[in-house]
Image: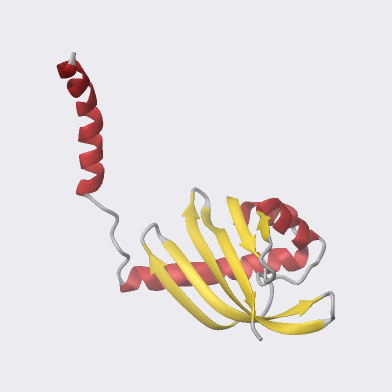
Amino acid sequence: MRRRTLLAGLPLLALASEAFAHPPRQPDSAEAKKFIQEVTDFRAKLAKAVRAKDLAALRALYADGFTHTTETGKLETRDARLAAAMAGEPMIEAAPASDLVFRVFTGPTVIVTGTSPILNVADQKTYDVRWVSVYVTAKDGWELAVSQATQLA
């Protein structure tokens, strides 16, 4: 009985060892530059869709499991973020950005940090916000997977 259990697990063991035999490779410098340009273009496309309130385009640009943590710590899902875009709320996705830093990882995955001025609708003041966004590759290209914003003092 014990031998059957061990033999039954051999195909799984073979698959697991094959998966570890060729781990994902960190992109080289040329690939990293290419991915940074692609994400830069993606960010421009996303900003344009936010400004145009193009729901169909936005839905395709945010990953299904997307979440955004707001400056106040509120967690928004993709649907909540899409509703905010349709309502014309100020968003880091469409705001001018400075201090951009791109980090490229396997996947490929690109993490971008930056600072943007965001209007606080409640008090009608603009505050600088430091943010981070994670872009991942999907079947149809890049998607925004997660973002977080922190209001600076």
Task: In the displayed orientation, state which residue is furthest to the left.
Answer: 3
Q: Position of residue 50 (x, y in %)?
A: 72, 65
| Residue 10 in sight here | yes
Quadrant in which residue 12 is drawn:
top left
Q: Nearer the viewer, residue 109 or 125?
A: 125
Answer above or below: position of 1 versus 30: above
Residue at image point 18% right, 21% down: 7
The quarter of the rendered structure image containing the C terminus is: bottom right
Residue at image point 60% right, 81% down: 115
| Residue 62 in sight here | no
Answer above or below: position of 34 versus 139: below
> How many numbered circles does the render carry?
0
Q: How is the image coloured?
A: secondary structure
The quarter of the rendered structure image containing the N terminus is: top left
Residue 130 placement, left or right of 136: right
Residue at image point 40% right, 73% down: 33
Q: Position of residue 80 (x, y in %)?
A: 73, 55
Q: Position of residue 122 (x, y in %)?
A: 84, 75
Quadrant in which residue 4 is drawn:
top left
Q: Position of residue 87 (x, y in %)?
A: 82, 62
